[in-house]
Amino acid sequence: MATGKAPHGTTSAPDPTALVRELRASVRGEVASDATARALTTMDASNYRRVPLGVVAPRDADDIAATLAVCRAHRVPVVPRGGGTSIAGQATGTGIVLDLTRHLRSIVELDPGSRTVVVQPGVVLDDLRAAAAPHGLTFGPDPSTHSRCTIGGMIGNNSCGSHSVAWGTTADNVHALTVARYGGDTLHLERGAEGPAGLRELAAAHLALLRTGFPELPRRISGYALDALLPENGPDHARAFCGSEGTLGVLTQATLRLVEAPAARALAVLGYADESAAAEAAPGLLPYRPLTVEGMAADLVREPAGLPRGAAWLFVETGGATPAEARAHAERIVRARSADAVDAAVVTDPAGQRALWRIREDAAGTATRMPEGSEAWPGWEDCAVPPARLGPYLRDFRVLLAEHGLRGTPYGHFGDGCIHVRIDFDLLTADGVARFRRFSEDQASLVVAHGGSLSGEHGDGQARAELLPRMYGDELVSLFTRFKDLWDPDGGMNPGILARPARLDENLRFDVLPRKPVDVAFGYPDDGGDFTAAVRRCVGVAKCRTEKVSGPSVMCPSFRATGEEAHSTRGRARLLHEMLAGAAGGVITDGWRSTEVRDALDLCLSCKGCRSDCPAGVDMATYKAEFLHHHYRGRLRPAAHYAMGRLPRWLRLAAPFARPLNALARVRPLAALAKRLAGIAPERGIPVLARETYTRWLDRRAGGGTSVFSHDRVALVWPDTFTEHLSPEVGQAAVRVLEAAGRTALTPGRGLCCGLTYVSTGQLDRARGVMRRTLDRLGGMIGEPVIVLEPSCAATLRTDLPELLPDDPRAAGLAASVHTLAQYLEAFAPDWQPPRLDRPVTGQTHCHQHAVLGDEADRRLRERAGLVGELAGGCCGLAGNFGFERGHWEVSVACAEDQLLPEVREAAPGTEILADGFSCRTQLGQVGGVRARHLAQVLAEGLEPGPR
């Protein structure tokens, strides 16, 4: 099969230099052809990879038209790109990628009376919904990527989402479109209006085929919607354009229909023995007119989440004018004979509903790993069958998987018969790719046998377009090609997609990756020790590109601060992918010495938020440390690496001279010189050194000695660098709290260091040396419960320590013994009653604690103490050495302004500001001008006066 018609029917290589020069002269937006820009757009969320010549971010419709005209003159293809979350490969291309997310983000007009809205293609769905919400309206289609997908991408793929049983697909909600064609001319599309010349004649000559060739089902997304050209349907050229995957033209403006949003919602969660039982129950619930009927199985649930009994569940959302009406509707569904569930629950609390929906929405990422950790991939992500056939189809699908020796966990839009699944294809070997092809061909036949569509939501792209003849037959597929040619006679719009498609096993993104593990410092236990496998974790679902977050989410603060793809977790993963590809075809060819990767990682705060918030488990903080380790090996490092990366050493040396050094730091010229030499941002204040270290205070108070450690009343408090030298008052407060709980606080040793600052600056050889020395000094104490008051140090001991010393069993032993103060009290002093403080709190859960340790015990302790209120999510922006480094001040402040500082400013008078991390407290003091305290300090203050 042909792999795509080249523009003008030629295969001559364009002149990239001349192309970029003319584009820059013709458009007002940004034009980039550097390695970083190209690397960031080689992939979407699919299995495919195509390397573009450059990227254009147009400022308006005129820029789009100008870009298309220049590209046509140079015979260069164009691919429009929104959020880049397409799962079938249609958002990648070999010519110019149009990035429509940077500037074309205006909601031009919203008319509540007519329930219509005019938008530009780069508008993010959640932004549109937020604008419509005050009018009681919403845009019906809502894919799980609603926080970052764009309207243009939704129209290109004819996206649906979980509410399609109530409000239909994107095409059902489109009124009119303005589209620029390859070459630059513009068309206005709506029902009854004329489309490109020749379309009316094409439809008139094939009326019978258009009336009989398309299966009747709610999620028929595959191919072109040529039946919209029938006279009885308008013809509706706007609807025919929907789902064309960037192959016909570029959307410049859209008029959409809005729907009334229910004032209240409830969620009925129905439990079943397996997903087939859930699938068979789903059609019977549709007569109750629910808003959603979503299905998923236990394989995708990472941890208990309050779900009713069962191994699979239906999420059935209902609406009403009041909470009572919505709840009554949900309870009717639970009682319905057709529900036939083994257990059920009705959730009306908005927070509880959000928590459950988060599980479902994250499935696109969690499904990328099988239960034991092996990789799973898209390719057959969203087939759809008539809802009444879903149960039998799933059983046959399971049989087909077994016949090919494959595994996958179905989930998705059961009410519409649309199933998502990622399958453990081996796409790294020739035999595995051959099996992928055989399965794909058999799967296409199975879907067609059940009266279904190869795509029920995400489009065909490169993954399935080759197999469209099995669904539609050769005659109708040939009409698809003629339709494409009438729109795009030069073949310049996204060639290789839909019409004259590339083969489904071409352009696989794994082809260029090294087949042997590269030499690395970390153990990567969840990826078989393979750094390449770790980087492959990023499948492109782009949750890291969410611009507005609420609640405990952290990822990705640097993207929210800059809005640049290069500073998202996904963007950095793409650059690392191209670095690993190297000479095999990667855009980045200088390996670990890459300045492109270094610059992108420079604004990574190492907050570890992606470790927990990324559905695929990407851990960019670790990848950054790994890269810096190799990048600077044998070379001079930035001054900040020596100053702050080796901070524990300098603080130990400075401790005896704290008083004079503090005095010198108050002399502005001397402080400015010191900051310049140390690579510290001039805007930063130098922290004050403790005049008495924590361990010296503890020795003086307890009379010295640390040898008694096995007694069940002894609590070991880790002397982390920050508590020891910069905030000993936190350690002192923790000692008082522990004594009130009936424990004697001791330190497990002197000169202990977790290695945090060495890890965060990529000095991994030194980090391992520090860690081994710490393990040696602990000796027989390893395994005893240890309280670590600084969350970043606790996270380092819990994760980085065993991953840098995977062959040392002592590392795993120490990691398993690490507790926060709240975790320790809950586990070892469960009957202790904290003082009742009864006051509101705000502040921030440390990002490392959120990502690695969790804050459930802290929440429970605060509740018992009467400290009411939620802490902010996100990252404070200081993040250890990051916010202190020269050049990071603006991003650091922007991160603080994202969630933390607004929460603090809005707090009522008398609200306690909590921040367990030294960085968080420092940022709040230096940028916010407020005093924050560790939870231990607040609890200690509320204790009855006692001996000190």
Image: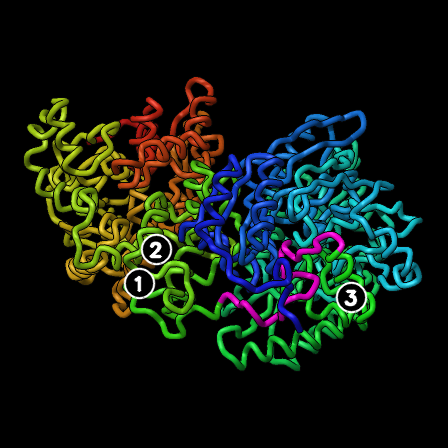
Q: Residue at x 32, y 40 (%)?
A: 879
Q: Is residue 918 left or right of residue 129?
A: left
For marks 2 and 1, give the CA distance.
8 Å
Q: Considering only order in the chain, which callout, 1 or 2, is on the residue closer to the N terminus? A: 1
- Do the residues bearing badges 2 and 1 touch, measured as CB atoms within 8 Å? yes
The crowd level at tag 1 (other Cα within 10 Å; few <14, some 14-19, many 20+) is many
What are the residue bounds of the magenta stretch? 486-509
Residue wearing tag 1: 522
Tell me if I can see residue 820 in this picture.
yes
Magenta-highlighted stretch: main secondary structure? loop
Q: Amino acid at mark 2?
A: Thr
Say which residue label 3 marks.
Answer: 477
Q: Secondary structure at mark 1?
A: loop
Instruction: List the residue tagged with mark 2.
Output: 622
Q: Secondary structure at mark 3?
A: helix
Compared to residue 292, the image places residue 118 above or below, namely above
Q: CA distance from mark 2 to mark 3?
A: 48 Å
Q: Residue at x 23, y 35 (%)?
A: 732
Q: Single out the mark in the foreground, 3 or 1.
A: 3
Residue 157 picture location, percent across and down = 68, 52
Density class for disc 2 (Cα within 10 Å; few <14, some 14-19, many ≥20) is many
**Lateral position of residue 598 relative to residue 460, left or right:** left
